[in-house]
Image: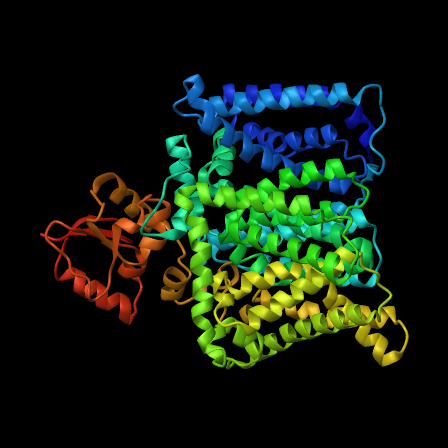
């Protein structure tokens, strides 16, 4: 089956009109499924495709066009929402982010842009060079089974506690990787395989439960600022949270305030499922973008293997699921690199595209924006002053533009709390320098990565061994790059980026406290965007050193021998099969200690949600409420209770007459010294005013 892009190119304006009419009809008639499907396609692809045509980015291939369409579209949605939010009052709009004003404003800009692109196209009736056509391979249908196994497997886990299908899905992914390592495939086949694996891994975590997954991270606070924006139909750029810098930083990010509001309102989608479904599907494009970034340098097969390493590392499908702003930010991060390193794109189109994607990154994630600024400035400086040859890709004007835009946004939104937090982190790292010779100051994750932390079990030791092998081969690959002992020839700017990323990893390891500013696992995950290819190159260089010439079969065998076990341990497949300690909620949640599942991991269930909503509707909670760990999960996300107003609950908490106490599922139904002590303490001083069997609200008489 052949999909010819010429038809799409020639009939672009009519297709946009048809989709827009379908969007209006689904909104007016409110056909839920049609509204979601048409809305996702329309919002996520069409605005970006229009911008690509306006910029005449003719050098982009089919896969690049799809990726940049998504990136430009998401940036467009955030900018459009920001514009109508800030200037809607001029037209008497008190609720500018409600469905009708949003849809009319976005659709008007889209149709005007489509008409302009059509007129600018003129008499040209051919698709851009390199856009090509898509040949459908029946094998793609087999690949579709992998995310299907993930969705069906999660359903059986949620309804029957049966994880056999999910275990089978993990085995299928390992088998697909093995086949891809042995046999050459087309770039589009590899890209589609990467997409299917990414979707399967992300959904097998995100679809667990009917509520967001905190995983001990930021998603409840992200959900709070999203729902606050949506319920007010207005984003408040100066809304500051003096008691909690985290809330202020989150409020400054349009990726978790305006963007999900646009999707939820126009699609008519439940807010929870915007984070649980739409965001993971967008994030699944990141490994494909990395594949396209690496392919020109190491070839399609090695780029596929490196993409698998990026996805196999557990942060990709666990911690990232609870970091919605970073999922969006990483797409912009990679697309910026892909745009900068594409020499076929003319400088004018590159600068405008850089500005658009740069705004997207700045609006999405502050730490990623700061890392990107450091990378491009360092790479430019190395090229200009050390290599004595200015970079073709990195113009100093781009760096200045990004710097000014970033700090302007972070200083003038949410009371400059993002800028203040940056200074706080800098002060924290400086204060830790006195412990330079104390290994513990680097944090537990760094010590584990260096092999200095004690392993809790034999299986964990084996797991660490495979992780250490990937790290060792990355070092070998970097050494091969520096010594120019490989057949791979990297574009100079990417080589400089990679060496800087490796230097950052070394600095994070050496400087006390630096890893804790973002968390070492997230730092390593980000740096793998540059370093993952060097693991594969390191394996290749190792076989070259041993046998003095290239042995493709041996390279494939060694890659499989290292990365397949690494993947099986990272997903906790091995721990679940062996029935040992596991942190995978999808695979092992049914046998996890309740205090760990509902306490440390913050798993949210319906009892706590209903109790939190009762508090929100019936309790004057401002500075009049104490709560257990639900303060960081259900009470924040679904009660929309700002945690700065709530006192933490422990044995030393002083309760006063008339104050209320919220107890979530972990305190009511989970046995443990901490919960029992708190429960006895509260029971002795309070009376029940609400109970649903899994959470309670009590009041001091």
Say how many tags the image has: 0
> Where is the N terminus found, in terms of image quarters?
top right
Give the residue displayed 46% in from the left and 68% down from the top.
430
Q: Nearer the viewer, residue 324 or 498?
A: 498
Camera-nearest residue between 112 and 224:
112
Q: Residue furthest right?
A: 549
Q: Locate residue 410, reporting x and y percent.
A: 48, 45
Residue 658 in view of the camera? yes
Residue 197, position in %: x, y? 66, 53
Tell whether 616 sits left or right of 43. left
- Identify the residue shown where x is 54% and y is 55%: 320
What's the residue at 65%, 69% (across, down)? 566
* Residue 132 horizontal/vertical position (percent): 84, 37
Direction from residue 60 to residue 607 in the image, left or right: left
* Above or below, comparing residue 148 to residue 539 in the picture: above
Front-lying residue, 623 or 585: 623
Q: Position of residue 49 (x, y in %)?
A: 70, 31
Q: Is residue 121 left or right of residue 499?
A: right
**Residue 348 located left or right of residue 130:** left
* In the rendered image, the vertical position of residue 644 relative to residue 227, given as above or below: below
Q: Residue at x 46, y 29 (%)?
A: 85
Seen in the picture, residue 661 relative to 3 is either above or below; the reply is: below
**Of residues 376 and 88, which is closer to you in this image?**
376
């Amino acid at each position: 089956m052949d999909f010819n892009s010429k038809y799409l190119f020639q009939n672009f304006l009519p297709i946009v009109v048809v989709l827009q009419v379908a969007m209006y009809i689904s909104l007016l008639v409110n056909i839920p499924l049609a509204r979601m499907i048409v809305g996702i396609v329309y919002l996520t692809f069409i605005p970006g495709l229009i911008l690509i045509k306006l910029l005449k980015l003719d050098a982009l291939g089919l896969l690049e066009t799809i990726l940049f369409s998504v990136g430009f579209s998401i940036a467009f949605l955030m900018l459009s929402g920001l514009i109508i939010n800030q200037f809607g009052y001029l037209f008497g709009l008190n609720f500018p982010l409600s469905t009708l004003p949003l849809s009319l404003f976005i659709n008007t800009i889209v149709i005007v842009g489509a008409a302009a692109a059509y007129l600018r196209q003129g008499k040209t009736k051919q698709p851009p060079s390199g856009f090509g056509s898509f040949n459908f391979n029946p094998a793609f249908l087999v690949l579709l089974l992998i995310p299907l196994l993930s969705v069906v497997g999660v359903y059986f886990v949620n309804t029957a506690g049966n994880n056999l299908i999910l275990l089978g899905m993990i085995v299928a992914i390992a088998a697909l990787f093995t086949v891809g390592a042995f046999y050459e495939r087309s770039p589009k086949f590899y890209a589609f395989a990467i997409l299917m694996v990414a979707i399967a891994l992300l959904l097998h975590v995100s679809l667990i439960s009917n509520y967001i997954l905190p995983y001990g991270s930021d998603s409840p606070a992200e959900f709070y600022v999203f729902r606050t924006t949506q319920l007010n139909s207005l984003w408040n750029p100066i809304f500051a949270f003096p008691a909690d810098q985290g809330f202020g930083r989150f409020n400054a990010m349009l990726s978790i305030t305006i963007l999900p509001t646009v999707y939820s309102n126009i699609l008519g989608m439940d807010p929870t499922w915007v984070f649980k479904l739409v965001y993971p599907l967008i994030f699944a494009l990141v490994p494909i973008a990395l594949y396209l970034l690496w392919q020109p340098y190491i070839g399609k097969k090695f780029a596929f293997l490196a993409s698998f390493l990026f996805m196999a590392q557990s942060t990709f499908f666990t911690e990232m699921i609870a970091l919605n702003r970073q999922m969006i930010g990483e797409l912009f991060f990679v697309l910026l690199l892909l745009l900068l390193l594409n020499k076929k794109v003319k400088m004018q189109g590159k600068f405008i595209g850089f500005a658009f994607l740069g705004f997207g990154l700045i609006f999405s994630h502050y730490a990623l924006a700061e890392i990107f600024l450091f990378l491009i400035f360092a790479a430019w400086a190395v090229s200009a002053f050390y290599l004595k040859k200015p970079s073709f890709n990195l113009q100093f004007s781009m760096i200045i533009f990004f710097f000014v835009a970033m700090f302007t946004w972070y200083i003038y939104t949410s009371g400059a709390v993002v800028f203040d937090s940056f200074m706080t982190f800098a002060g924290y790292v400086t204060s830790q320098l006195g412990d330079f010779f104390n290994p513990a100051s680097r944090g537990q994750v760094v010590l584990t990565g260096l092999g200095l932390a004690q392993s809790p079990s034999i299986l964990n030791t084996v797991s660490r061994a495979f992780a250490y092998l990937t790290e060792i081969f990355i070092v070998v690959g970097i050494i091969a790059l520096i010594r120019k002992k490989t057949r791979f020839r990297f574009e100079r700017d990417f080589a400089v980026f990679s060496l800087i990323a490796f230097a950052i990893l070394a600095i994070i390891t050496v400087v006390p406290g630096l890893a804790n500013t973002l968390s070492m696992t997230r730092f390593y995950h980000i740096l793998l965007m540059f370093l993952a290819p060097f693991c594969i190159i390191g394996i290749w260089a190792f076989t070259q050193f041993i046998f003095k010439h290239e042995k493709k079969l041996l390279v494939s065998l060694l890659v499989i021998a290292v990365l397949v076990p690494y993947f099986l341990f990272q997903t906790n497949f091995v721990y679940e099969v062996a029935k040992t300690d596991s942190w995978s909620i999808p695979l092992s949640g049914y046998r996890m200690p309740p205090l760990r599942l509902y306490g440390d991991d913050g798993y949210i269930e319906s009892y706590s949600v209903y109790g939190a909503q009762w508090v929100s509707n019936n309790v004057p909670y401002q500075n009049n409420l104490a709560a257990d760990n639900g303060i960081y999960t259900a009470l924040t996300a679904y009660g929309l209770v700002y945690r700065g107003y709530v006192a933490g609950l422990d044995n030393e908490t002083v309760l006063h007459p008339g104050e209320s106490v919220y107890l979530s599922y972990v305190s009511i139904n989970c046995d443990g010294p901490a919960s029992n002590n708190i429960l006895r303490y509260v029971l002795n001083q309070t009376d029940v005013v609400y109970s649903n069997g899994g959470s309670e609200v009590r009041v001091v008489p």
